[in-house]
Amino acid sequence: MTKPTTTFDPASVRAKFSLKHLLMAAAFRATNATNDIRYYFNGVHVMACRDGGVFVTGVDGHTLLLAYDSAGTIENAPNGVILTVKPGLLAAAAKNKCRRDGVDMFAIVEGQRLSVNHDFNAAQSPLEAFVSPGPCQVEGRFPDVFRVIPRFETLKPHMAGPMNSEYFARLDVVNKLARHGKYNGAIRLWSSHDDDKFKAGTIVVQFDHAPEVLAIIMPMRSFDSLAFPAVARIDGLVTPPPAPAAAADPVTP
C-alpha cells in the first residue's frame, strides 16, 4: 500500500515561541554562509517536540545551540521550519529586552510573516515591535542535530581540549538573555571522550540559569595542546627549589 504524500505548505505554518530562545540560537548560526551549500545555516530552525513544546536550534558547522521551549507551539510543519534572522529583528529584541510595556514578547510565525509580538492575530498591535521584510522561511533540509549530541555518560566535567576563544562571546549572549541582561550566571563545561558517534574532546556547555539550553563546541587544533604554559615556568611562578642544606661546621684538626 502506498503511503500518502505529505504536502508542506509554508503559508499554513503557525508558530509561537520565546523570543529569547530565537536570539540565543541566532548567536550560533552562520552569518556568512550565503555562498555555502549549507546556506540554511544562516537561519534558525524550529521544530515540534513529540512531548510538547518546540526545539529552537542554531548551528554553523563548528558550534551548535539547542533550546527547548516547553510553552512553544508550531503547526503544519512536520519537519520544522528554518527562519531567516534579519538585523532589524536583533535590534528590536535588544531594544525591548524581550519585553515591551511589561509584556513578554514572542517570535510569531504566521505563514511567511515573522514578527515580534505578544500573540497570534495581533498584526498592527501597539505591542508589535518588528515585522520581518519579505518571506521569513528558508528552503532547505536542516541537519538532524540530535545525531551529534553525545550521550551524557560519555561526558566528563572539565574541558579537555582547546577551543576557539571567540565562542565565549556567544556563550555570553546566552547568559545575558537567560538573566534578562543582569549579572551573568555560571557555565559548566563537559568534555566528551571516545564515543562511537562523536569526536573526542567535543565540548558540551551547560548554563546554570538556562537549564533548557545546551551548546556544543567542536575542539580546534592546537599547535601544542599538551605543553605546560611557558609563563608558568618563569622563576617565581613555579614551586621554588628546596633551600640548599646548611654548610657543615669546619672540622678542627
Image (cartoon, grey):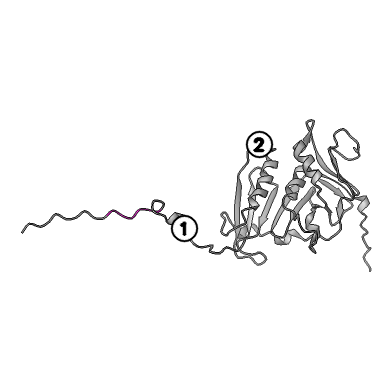
Where does the N terminus fall, quadrant-wise?
bottom right
Q: Which dot marks residue 182?
A: 2
Can I make out residue 69 in this image?
A: no
* Foreground pick, 28 / 121: 28
Q: Earlier in the sequence, mark 1 or mark 2?
A: 2
Q: Which dot marks residue 230?
A: 1
Q: Position of residue 53 (x, y in %)?
A: 79, 47
Where does the C terminus fall, quadrant-wise?
bottom left
Q: Is residue 23 magenta-colored?
A: no
How many marks can you see?
Answer: 2
Mark 2, other Cα within 10 Å: few <14 / some 14–19 / many ≥20 = few
Q: Position of residue 97 (x, y in %)?
A: 74, 37
* Amino acid type, residue under disc 1 in the picture: Ala
Q: Is residue 174 left or right of residue 79?
A: left
Q: Taking 199 as reference, is 178 above or below it? A: above
Can I make out residue 84 in this image?
A: yes
Quadrant location of residue 241? bottom left
Q: Is residue 21 left or right of residue 239?
A: right
The residue at 86%/45% (across/down) is 132
The residue at 62%/61% (across/down) is 220
Quadrant location of residue 138? bottom right
| Dominant secondary structure of the residues highlighted in magenta in the image | loop
Q: Position of residue 225 (x, y in %)?
A: 54, 62
* Amino acid type, residue under disc 2 in the picture: Lys
Q: Position of residue 206 (x, y in %)?
A: 64, 49
Which range of residues does the magenta coloring cover? Answer: 238-243
Farthest top residue?
101
Farthest bottom residue?
1
The residue at 56%/59% (across/down) is 160
* Foreground pick, 5 / 111: 111
